Amino acid sequence: MERILATEEAPLKHGTVGCVAVDAMGRLAAATSTGGISKQLQGRVGDSPIIGAGTWAKDGVVAISCTGDGEAFIQGAVAHDVFARMAYGGQDVASAATDTFAAECDRRGSTDGLIAVTGNRQVFLCHNSAMMFAAFTEGHDVDTWI
């Protein structure tokens, strides 16, 4: 690994695409597709296929998709932690996501972001990176955020 890091010039890059959705009945869904991360050992498994790490959805509560350093999401079960703070702790989505990021991502020094939507269509974007691209649509109108 040291040899690879010494010879590779490209910085670590993320290429995650995430989606959260709520339908007309208030049912929630989340999906995350990773672009992978460079300079990793063969066989590394990131957070995308691990339910609760970077992806979680529970009808009546929240749908979440995360992007960033998968190790932080895995170690902190970040998506599930946001859900648990809402479902069991009574927090709203903004407080739950912000508190989870402080407890699990910021303290690890990772650079991360998440999108979330609740059953009552409250959309929330949280990140500790310089920027994060996101879009929201309801009907035919599209809002974008950077």
Image (cartoon, grey):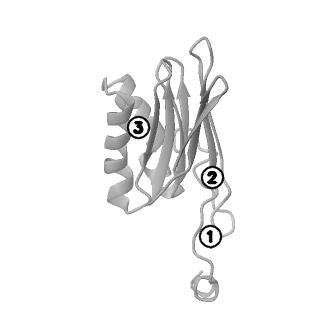
Mark 2–mark 3 contact, CB under 8 Å? no
Q: Residue visible at 31% across and 48% down?
A: 103
| Residue that badge 3 annotates | 81
Q: Amino acid at mark 3?
A: Asp
Q: CA distance from mark 3 to mark 1?
A: 26 Å
- Note whether 64 is above or below 138 in the view shown: below
Q: Amino acid at mark 1?
A: Gln
Q: Secondary structure at mark 3?
A: helix
Q: Residue visible at 62% across and 43% down?
A: 18
- Note whether 57 is above or below 104 in the view shown: above
Q: CA distance from mark 2 to mark 1?
A: 16 Å
- Note whether 115 is above or below 9 in the view shown: above
Q: Secondary structure at mark 1?
A: loop
Of circles 2 and 1, which is in front? 2
| Residue that badge 2 annotates | 16
Q: Residue visible at 51% across and 58% down?
A: 69
Q: Position of residue 71 (x, y in %)?
A: 50, 57
User: Foreground: 123 or 89?
Assistant: 123
| Residue that badge 1 annotates | 40
The quadrant of the image that shows the N terminus is bottom right
Give the mark, 3 or 1, whose residue is nearer the N terminus.
1
Left or right placement of residue 122 versus residue 88 in this view:
right
